[in-house]
């Protein structure tokens, strides 16, 4: 939704300053929302759990 508003602002007033502002807001939102959500997928495992699937592939 916010990106739509940014593109609408670019359509109304096509200027470099508007483009830079939209890109800064887009990158800040990506860093603030998407990156922490992506990092939550990584789970810390014990050594036993992390080596168990490899041992099953060897056998």
Image: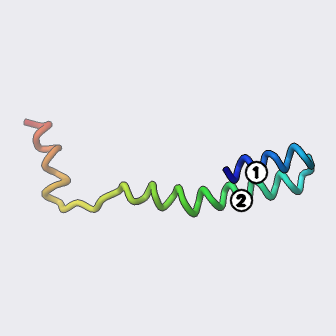
Residue 41, label in figure: none
Q: Is residue 57 left or right of residue 23?
A: left
Q: Nearer the viewer, residue 28 or 50?
A: 28
Which residue is drawn at the image coordinates 68% and 55% (left, top)? 26
Q: Specify the quadrant of the image occupied by residue 38.
A: bottom left
Check disc 2 and report its element: helix, strand or loop. Answer: helix
Please report contact status of discs 2 and 1: CB closer than 8 Å, yes or no: no
Q: Is residue 53 left or right of residue 1?
A: left
Q: Specify the quadrant of the image occupied by residue 29.
A: bottom right
User: In the image, which is nearer the foreground, mark 2 or mark 1?
Assistant: 1
Q: Nearer the viewer, residue 45 or 4?
A: 4
Of mark 2 and mark 1, the one earlier in the sequence is: 1
Which residue is drawn at the image coordinates 90% and 46% (left, top)? 12
Query: Where in the figure is residue 27, as x and y percent of width and height?
Result: 66, 56
Which residue is drawn at the image coordinates 92% and 50% (left, top)? 15
Residue 5, label in figure: 1
Residues at marks 2 and 1, CA–CA distance in whole angstroms: 11 Å
Check disc 1 and report its element: helix, strand or loop. Answer: helix
Q: How is the structure coloured here?
A: rainbow
Q: Quadrant of the C terminus?
A: top left
Q: Residues within 10 Å of mark 1 (few under 14, many from 20)?
A: few
Q: Is residue 29 left or right of residue 44?
A: right
Question: Residue most toward the left?
Answer: 59
Q: Residues within 10 Å of mark 2 (few under 14, many from 20)?
A: some
Residue corresponding to mark 2: 25
Query: Where in the figure is residue 41, as x and y percent of width and height?
Result: 37, 55
Query: Where in the figure is residue 3, as x and y percent of width and height?
Result: 71, 49
Q: Is residue 23 above or below residue 44?
A: above
């Amino acid at each position: 939704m916010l990106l739509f508003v940014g593109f609408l602002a670019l359509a109304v007033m096509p200027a470099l300053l508007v483009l830079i502002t939209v890109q800064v807001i887009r990158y800040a939102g990506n860093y603030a929302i998407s990156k922490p959500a992506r990092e939550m997928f990584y789970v810390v495992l014990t050594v036993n759990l992390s080596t168990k699937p490899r041992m099953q592939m060897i056998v």
